[in-house]
Image (cartoon, rainbow, N blue to C red):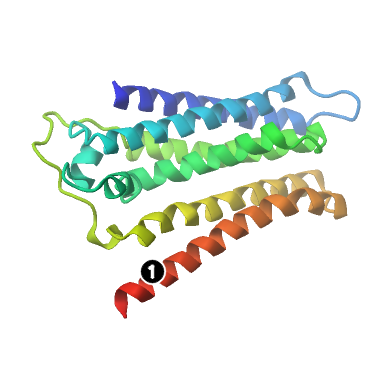
Amino acid sequence: MIAEIGLAALWLAAALAVLQMVSGGFALRSVEGAPNPMAIYARPAAVVQAVLAVLAFILLLYAFAVTDLSIKLVATNSHSMKPMIYKLTGTWGNHEGSMLLWVGVLALSGGLLAAFEKRLPERTMGATLGVQGFVALGFYAFLLFSSNPFERLPVPAVEGVGLNPLLQDPGLAIHPPLLYLGYVGFSIAFSFAIDALLEGRIDAVWARFVRPWTLLAWSFLTLGIAMGSYWACLLYT
């Protein structure tokens, strides 16, 4: 049932991304003092979408932790005798799993913005979350229609193939998630920028809202690049 629940969570998250995108569009049509009634759904849609996307990723992590060889992705990227760190690394050490991690970070970024950013005007918040939902929807479509991480095998494998040898190192195992937190974290800055273009307003106030989210993403990206470079030097020298 783990694979089926994870896949259902992804479908529900994709539906909420549509709601978030549409609600953000209505937010742009709001006028000061008279918010559009449909604009109120952007925040809750972003938060619940984040919960569902993270849940899907956690379920895939669990499938790798227990080496569920009925799931194709686990069978082709893990092995029952691997240490736990490399079993978990197999979750993102492949195309489908890394895309799920990407979507999870993308949804989590929007969810954190919706849940904790209280200073933004509702029109700006709604439009920013609408752009974030639009971006996320493209990745959900890619995952669900061409790169399903929860695909079942007709017959469970007897044993897994194992993890890519290049990732069987503690530093390089942690390196990809840190990079993704940086790369995908910049989606918030992108969504703010698109909203500013749509509203025709870029000023010091806008920059103050964007700065902490940009610095957070930049910090993760810098840490990921530094760690990857350090461990690569250790491995090849």
Image quadrant where residue 211 sits: bottom right
Q: Position of residue 52 (x, y in %)?
A: 48, 27
Left or right position of 230 against 127: left
Where 38 sits versus 195, above or below? above
Q: Secondary structure at mark 1?
A: helix
Residue placed most toward the observer, 74 or 127? 74
Q: Position of residue 192 (x, y in %)?
A: 71, 47
Residue found farthest to the bottom: 237
Q: Residue at x 11, y 40 (%)?
A: 159
Where 67 sits versus 210, above or below? above
Residue receiving disc 1: 231
**Quadrant in which the N terminus appears:** top left
Where 77 sits versus 58, above or below? below
Q: Residue at x 82, y 48 (%)?
A: 200
Q: Position of residue 215 (x, y in %)?
A: 67, 57
Image quadrant where residue 143 sits: top left
**Quadrant in which the C terminus appears:** bottom left
Residue placed most toward the observer, 137 or 49? 49
Inspect the image, locate mark 1, and give the three-letter code of the amino acid beneath it: Trp
Residue placed most toward the observer, 176 or 85? 85
Left or right position of 8 against 153: right
Q: Residue at x 54, y 60 (%)?
A: 221
Left or right position of 82 against 57: left
Left or right position of 80 against 150: left
Image quadrant where residue 59 sits: top left
Residue found farthest to the left: 158
Q: Position of residue 233 (x, y in %)?
A: 37, 76
Q: Residues within 10 Å of mark 1 (few under 14, many from 20)?
A: some
- Disc tally is 1
Residue found farthest to the front: 83
